[in-house]
Image: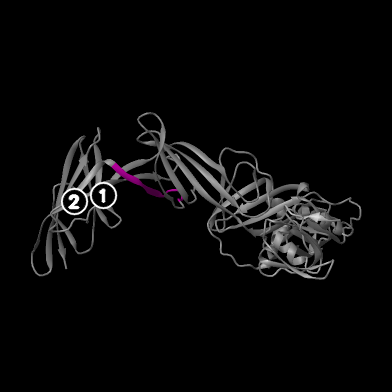
Amino acid sequence: MKIKLLYIAVSLAVTALNANAADSFVSSSDERVRIDMTIYNNNMALLKDVRNSIEGKDGYFADKTDIIFDGISDQIIPETLGFSGGDLSEFNYSYDLTSHDSLLKNMIGYKIDVLEYGSTASFTGTLLSDNGNRLLIKREKDGDIVSLPKNSDSWTYFFNEIPPNLTSSPTLEVKAFNLSDEDIGISYLTNGLSWTANYVATIESPEEMDLNGWVTINNTTSTSYEEASVNVVAGSPNINSRPDMYRAMQKNMRNDMMVQSAMPMPEQGNVGEYKIYKLPFKTDIEAKQKKQVALFDIDKIDYKKTYEHVVGNARYGNTEPFKEKVKVYVEIKNNEVSGLGMPIPSGNIRFYEKDSFGDVQFIGENKMPDLNVGETERFNIGEAFDISIKEMIGFEKKVNGTVLERNYLVDITNSKADPVEVNIIMPLESNMIIVDSNEAFGKLAGRGLVFPVRVEPDSTSRLEYTMKLTR
């Protein structure tokens, strides 16, 4: 019987299962009771896959049984396998999957038929080679060697046989003994699954905003996971592929994989030195899919908006002042008083606010670091259109051979209809001393001294200060 390449995957799946049915049980993904996944930041996940018990099936022997699992990840790390429902003595992982290239590679020495699309030209013979971009076929009718293009849409390939070592999907054959009457399951680490956090902050008033958290799950494996219970871990565990590290998982798998109840917020906990978040509902994660899952939705979080400028750009002798718009910062404190009070994993945070027409618009973004309870973070979301800076050096003179005195002039213009306070920050070094200032300076911020300057609507305020620098 001739089989067209288009239909070869279905045929291979049936053949693979039939070949093993005589002496093995096939546990398909349709018999999955549940699947739990814990996804890490470093393109790795721990999967715990529970299937229906095979007790009572014809040919079942508790002392020794071969079980074939399909629907496993094609990026499995085989040495991390754990098994529940009995004892594991041996396993075999088959990953030579059906594709155009792998099929041709495994058909060397087999009979194939090649037909040119839209033409009567055809070739029947034994495939001799698929090296490079050409196929070599020994024709059946006359023994001539024919060279054909390997990757051409003009040719359709037909195969008379299926190589026995090819499978349509990754399969795992487990040799188990001392089987119990409970459900069977496997656990393993796999590459190809990762997650990132994204946040949407909607400013509702000058003091409060709403914060939505989203988990973006990226599945680059060729396997789909339906109704999966998902945990995500903030942190990057060190990876050291030692099989003995994971064998203990099989003893406690059933306790680890309890179905979680629905909840409006993720359940947050600790695992080792990391933070773990249990998503409050199950979700389907399809093969080769990137999807977003809601992490949390919190209304009325306190925040503080500040305007800032760091001086030090003006140069003595320049006739034109240095001009710049002030930077806008949003500050959030992670505690219960502000409306948060839970560890926040790192990710991108995007800010939105209503415009004067009542429509919500994007106003800036930044990076959210891992933010623990009690910590404060400031986000630069852009520059203020209506608040500008002119920075100049009034005078500069030598006091003596090692001391220089420099006078700074900073004009802040506020074109808004409301008054604003702008923090002018002077980078401070150990060799600097403030001699005089027309504004009181506040606390140190990092390595800078802060001058909070109030500017009335549609007006300009000047900050002037003089300092000495010792060389």
Q: Are marks 1 and 2 in contact (CB under 8 Å)?
A: yes
Say which amino acid is labelled 2.
Glu
Quarter of the picture containing the N terminus is bottom right
SS label for mark 2 = strand
Left or right of 353? Residue 18 is right
The residue under label 1 is 309
> Is residue 103 at least partly visible in the picture?
yes
Residue 376 belongs to magenta span: yes
* Magenta segment: 371-384
Q: Which of marks 1 and 2 is nearer the N terminus?
A: 1
Label disc, if present, on residue 391 of the rendered structure: 2
Residue 158 x/y as whole percent:
79, 57
- Between residue 219 and residue 187, name the one nearer to us: 219
> Residue 293 location, x and y as percent?
57, 43
Q: Toward the viewer: 355 or 247?
A: 355
Image point (22%, 56%), residue name: 313
Query: Mark 1 or 2, which is nearer the eye?
Result: 2
- Residue occupying the point 65% across, 47% down: 286
Tell me residue 12's x, y (percent). 80, 56
Tell whether 308 sits left or right of 231: left
Question: Which quadrant holds residue 244?
Answer: bottom right
Q: Main secondary structure of the magenta part?
A: strand
Left of 417 or right of it: where is 368? Answer: right
Residue 217 x %, y %: 58, 49
